[in-house]
Image: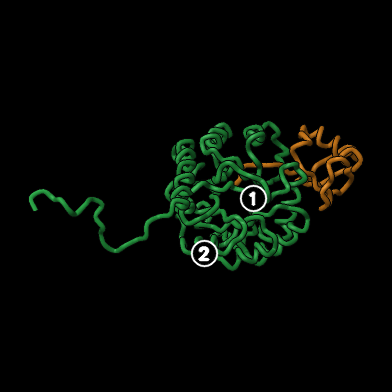
């Protein structure tokens, strides 16, 4: 089956893999990872400029913005007000009117506060933002976000940075079934098979940061993720065989020697 | 006069426009957003908005994140 393009809010992306810009050992290595991953959308955070040390290089010097679309996030925000303020600042900084919307509800798990997330989505959509909310693997929350105007929904596979892989595969499958907007599995990927599984479940894309930036060899892992996302997507489109409890021979049972 | 710049006290000799303040701080205005007393300053008004005594300023930019 020929794949359909990966389109969010009318914009087409060539890669279904979205990667972060945090926690890399160096800016040049981040750039090399972005290239190896094939991603054409990367997330950034919005933070205070370091006033006392202006010698630090700008992150943006290491992102090929001709090829890569920048998606500012509202990471670290704990209220709708904070997240909205951060999104507005990101837009004014010339980054984008798109936002990966995070409203966190708990420090230890970084699980989202869905009530505040839905409220912030509604407000930002009314201000012309393209909102991609990071949410629980909850089909009802995803439906409410879609109703609030989200351009995509981004359910977590597992807690941010945990590398646990997709904890509730059935929910991701149901979210895909329920959603009219793209579903991007965001957070929890630890290794390539996790990304492939997300795509096999029908996700339209996968977003990750730590799995690449924290790998022993980040550039190699970025390339692995590129292949995993492509492989998972192809497998989803190809349609897997049903699971069975017992064996079915692959070779003919007739014509056996000596029988 | 003292302003609060990114949460810290900061001394200025005299009121300055946003453009002049960014120049003094060696910050490229194209890559930041500026919030003045909780209001975002539109880029085209950087030359006219003046920062004065007691003002609270936030200057933000993109950093690595997921």
Q: Which residue is outermost to the front?
A: A255
Residue A86 in sight here: no
Q: Which of A113 and A153 is in front in this view?
A: A153
Q: How far apart are marks 1 and 2 (CA)?
A: 20 Å
Q: How crowded is mark 2: few (under 14 residues within 10 Å), some or many (20 or more)?
A: some
Q: Quadrant of residue A139 in the image? A: bottom right
The shade of chain B is orange
Indicate left or right for B55 with A194 as reference.
right
Residue drawn 70% across the image and 49% down it: A98
Residue at which label 1 appears: A8
Up-down relation of residue A121 to residue A48 (above or below): below
Residue at position x 25%, y 59% in the image:
A247
Answer with left or right where residue A162 lies relative to residue A143. left
Question: Between disc 1 and disc 2, whose residue precedes?
Answer: 1
Kindly indicate the quadrant of the structure image that contains residue A118: bottom right
Q: Position of residue A236 (x, y in %)?
A: 46, 52
Which chain letter matches label 2? A
Question: Residue at label 2?
Answer: A174
Q: How is the image coloured?
A: by chain
- Mark 1 touching mark 2, by CB under 8 A? no
């Amino acid at each position: 089956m020929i794949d359909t393009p990966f389109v969010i809010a009318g914009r087409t992306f060539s890669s279904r893999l979205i990667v972060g810009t945090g926690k890399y050992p160096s800016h040049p290595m981040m750039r090399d990872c972005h290239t190896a991953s094939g991603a054409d959308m990367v997330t950034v955070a919005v933070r205070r400029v370091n006033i006392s040390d202006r010698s630090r290089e700008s992150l943006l010097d290491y992102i090929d913005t001709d090829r890569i679309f920048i998606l500012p996030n509202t990471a670290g925000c704990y209220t709708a007000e904070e997240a909205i303020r951060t999104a507005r600042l990101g837009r004014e900084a010339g980054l984008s009117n798109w936002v990966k919307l995070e409203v966190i509800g708990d420090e230890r798990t970084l699980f989202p506060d869905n009530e505040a997330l839905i409220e912030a989505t509604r407000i930002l959509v009314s201000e012309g933002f393209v909102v991609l909310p990071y949410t629980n693997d909850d089909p009802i929350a995803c439906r409410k976000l879609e109703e609030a105007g989200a351009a995509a929904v981004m359910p977590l596979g597992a807690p941010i940075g945990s590398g646990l892989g997709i904890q509730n595969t059935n929910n991701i499958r149901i979210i895909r079934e329920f959603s009219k907007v793209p579903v991007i599995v965001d957070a929890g990927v630890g290794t390539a098979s996790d990304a492939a599984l997300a795509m096999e479940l029908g996700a339209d894309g996968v977003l990750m940061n730590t799995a690449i930036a924290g790998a022993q060899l980040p550039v190699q892992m970025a390339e692995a993720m590129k292949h995993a996302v492509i492989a998972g997507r192809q497998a989803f489109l190809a349609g897997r065989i049903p699971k069975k409890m017992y064996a079915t021979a692959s070779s003919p049972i007739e014509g056996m020697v000596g029988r | 006069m003292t302003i609060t710049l990114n949460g810290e006290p900061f001394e200025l000799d005299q009121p300055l426009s946003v453009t002049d303040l960014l120049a003094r701080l060696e910050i490229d205005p194209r890559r930041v957003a500026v919030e003045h007393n909780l209001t975002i300053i539109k880029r085209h008004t950087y030359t006219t908005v003046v920062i004065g005594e007691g003002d609270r300023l936030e200057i933000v930019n993109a950093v690595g994140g997921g």
